[in-house]
Amino acid sequence: MQQPIVSNYIKRFFILFCGLAIMAVGVTFSIKATLGISPISCFPYVLNQVFGIFTVGQFTTAMHVFFVLLQIPLLRRDFSIKHVLQLAVAVVFGTMIDVSLFIFADIAPSSYLQQFFFLSLSIILLSFGIFLEVKANVLFVAGEGLVKAISSTFSIDFGKVKVFFDSFLVLISLIVGLGFNHQVIGVREGTILAALFVGAIVKILGQYIHFLDNFVSIKTSNERRSTKAVQTILPYSEE
């Protein structure tokens, strides 16, 4: 009985890994497009451009670690091992971003049309990566975890907290860019488009793509309860 469950979770972690890798490429293409970075990745990019001490991936990891730490006073006794494991997700995701930036270092769009192509591709990849993260249903990135913690602690709708959270990250990015470099960095039309379309595309993917359902099928009542609990974390879950 235990072997199928273990095998199922191995599959889910594999899907999560693939989702994080695809999201990392999406972040890379948004950087290469130079038309604005998605809200969750905008701040690490700005920090890298302004200070240059660490890579984009390292700043991303540091930011997500900070998000995990913020969840401790919010959740208190409800802070558990699944929240601690967000640290591992942060390290993996940050490393993947740096690897992806290295692999695609030579990409340099020379026209607005090419820039928009890579921006569009980045939005699609980010959406599909998040879709896989939701489908894996085992762990989640710390940004979403912090939003969920705020939502549950103060009984505020997840969607409202998410919008405020993303807006706050963009605002901080603007302040840091203007304050240190006297210019807007990483925030452009692509930032707005990502905020508008990524969640919507994930919902569409959840409604129409079901080829992984059997691959990560849920076998036990405990897993069903776990699924319902995790699905409250992300607003674009398909169930």
Image (tube, rainbow, N blue to C red):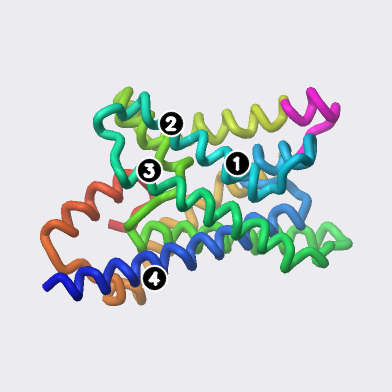
Q: Which numbered disc, 1 or 3, marks the residue closer to the eye?
A: 3
Between the C-alphas of marks 3 and 2, the distance is: 22 Å
| Residue denoted by label 1 | 39
Between the C-alphas of marks 2 and 4, the distance is: 28 Å
| Residue denoted by label 4 | 209
In this picture, which residue range is highlighted in magenta? 176-185
Quadrant in the rendering for residue 222: bottom left
| Residue denoted by label 2 | 161
Between the C-alphas of marks 4 and 3, the distance is: 31 Å
SS of the residue under disc 4: loop
Whichever of labels 2 and 4 marks the residue nearer the N terminus, that label is: 2
Marks 1 and 2: in contact by CB < 8 Å?
no
| Residue denoted by label 3 | 84
Between the C-alphas of marks 1 and 3, the distance is: 23 Å
- Residue 106 falls left or right of residue 129: right
Q: What is the chief secondary structure element of the magenta stretch?
A: helix
* Frontmost residue, 53 versus 186: 53
Q: Which numbered disc, 2 or 4, marks the residue closer to the eye?
A: 2
How packed is label 3: few (under 14 Cα within 10 Å), some, or many (20 or more)? some
